[in-house]
Image: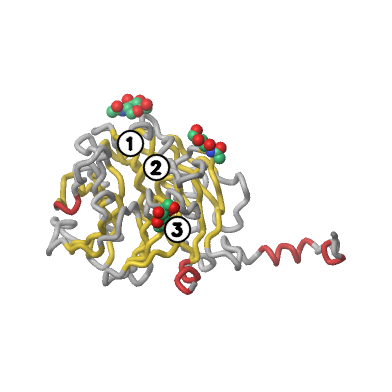
Amino acid sequence: MVHFWQIILLPSFLLNIVKAVPSPLPSNLAIHTIYEFPNETWIENIAVSSNGNLLLNLLSTPQLYQLQALNPVPGSAKLLYTFPYATGLTGIAEIQPDVFAVLAGNWSIGTFSTTPGSWSVWKVDFRRGRKNDPAVSKITDLTKASFANGMTLLTPGSPYLLIADSVLGVVWRLDYLTSEYEIILESPLMLPPPGPIVLGINGIHVFDSSVYFTNSFQGLFARVPVELYGPDAGSATGDYVVVANNGPGDDFAFDKEGNAYITQDPSDALELVTRKGMVTVLAGNVNSTILEGDTAASFGRTKWDENVLYVVTNGGIAGAVKGTQITGGKVLAVDVKALLSS
Ligand SMILES: *[C@@H]1O[C@H](CO)[C@@H](O)[C@H](O)[C@H]1NC(C)=O
Ligand SMILES: *[C@@H]1O[C@H](CO)[C@@H](O)[C@H](O)[C@H]1NC(C)=O
Ligand SMILES: *[C@@H]1O[C@H](CO)[C@@H](O)[C@H](O)[C@H]1NC(C)=O
């Protein structure tokens, strides 16, 4: 049935006003799919640019995509770059305003294992008007690393990137200006436990002078206070502490207060871990496809989406929910406040 108001044509200037308030989330939904890649696409990580665009690292192919989060149009994910001599991408971190570092290397989705020595760090530079066509160059090979996975800048303005090595169970410190790198943090809490899939420390981020990390198969979230400046930047200044034994964690994002939102691929949930270590499952579980295969998260950066948590997934390639099919990796917009109050 067609209602009379559906056939009134709005003048185009009015339509533009209606469209001028962008939002990735329809008001009635706390979790909304804004983009889905073709089947068997594993999105491994996400960063958000200052202009609001999402940068998506794929692990199933060595490709970096860009997605407009506000007013998304189906099919609008844009391939920015295919990295040579690699099978996939893992970590991504902003090193200077509008310049990102990206990890590329070989990790097999068939065997869930990596090729040690295959990883390298690249620079993706959106400055000088190249916001849809970045200049890409290699920073360095990381031949001493086994599986370079999560990555973060130590602190704004620092030349140091911290890179979680999920197989060696250590954190590398790379000076992206000189390409020198060395092990800066190591702890039993970073090691992979024995098992068929070798995976220890995974996501890594810094809040308030502490390095926080997940250890996927030890099932914990931990922190250690570190030096932020000087020649010892990145080294521990105190004890390693388990914040929560929260089950398998992949990557995570902090809100402004330092609460962590942890994606739980392969157990398909999104957790909130407060600074004091209180754990709340916000959504999802092993039997739910709502966040299936969630691998990483990042908050929006514009005034329209600063409370929106963007979550990326592998569509269940690491273990589909019973009775369901693997889908393409998804980009989800999540209203964490709505989930907390529901
Ligand atoms: C990683 O995979 C790429 C693409 O298949 C291949 O060209 C390269 O030689 C591999 N690197 C190593 C160190 O095996
Ligand atoms: C998932 O489903 C299985 C089988 O129905 C059930 O035993 C288990 O408790 C469920 N787990 C959760 C977290 O819902
Ligand atoms: C995606 O691919 C997998 C593996 O080939 C297949 O099992 C699954 O049915 C596919 N999913 C869809 C939605 O077609």
Horizontal and vertical percent position of residue 218: 23, 52
- Of labels 3 and 1, the one closer to you: 3
Horizontal and vertical percent position of residue 220: 25, 57
Q: Identify the mark at residue 285; answer none if there is no mark.
A: none
Query: The disc labelled 3 sits on which kind of residue?
Result: Gly
- Given residues 202 and 322, the one toward you in this image is 322
Q: Which residue is mark 1?
A: 112
Q: Are marks 2 and 3 in contact (CB under 8 Å)?
A: no
Query: The disc labelled 2 sits on which kind of residue?
Result: Ala
Q: Which residue is mark 2?
A: 318
Q: Quadrant of residue 223?
A: bottom left
Horizontal and vertical percent position of residue 314: 44, 45
Q: Mark 1 CB in 8 Å range of ligand 3?
A: no
**Who's the residue at 13% across and 56% down the image?**
232
Q: Is residue 257 left or right of residue 315?
A: left
Query: The disc labelled 1 sits on which kind of residue?
Result: Phe
Q: Mark 2 CB in 8 Å range of ligand 3?
A: no
Q: Residue furthest bottom?
A: 341
Compute the Cα span from label 2 to label 3: 16 Å
Residue 221 seen in the figure:
yes
Q: Local crowd at mark 1 within 10 Å, few (<14), some, or many (≥20)?
A: few
Q: Which residue is mark 3?
A: 284
- Whichever of labels 3 and 1 marks the residue nearer the N terminus, that label is 1
Q: Are marks 3 and 1 in contact (CB under 8 Å)?
A: no
Please say if 1 is above or below 142. Answer: below
Q: Local crowd at mark 3 within 10 Å, few (<14), some, or many (≥20)?
A: some
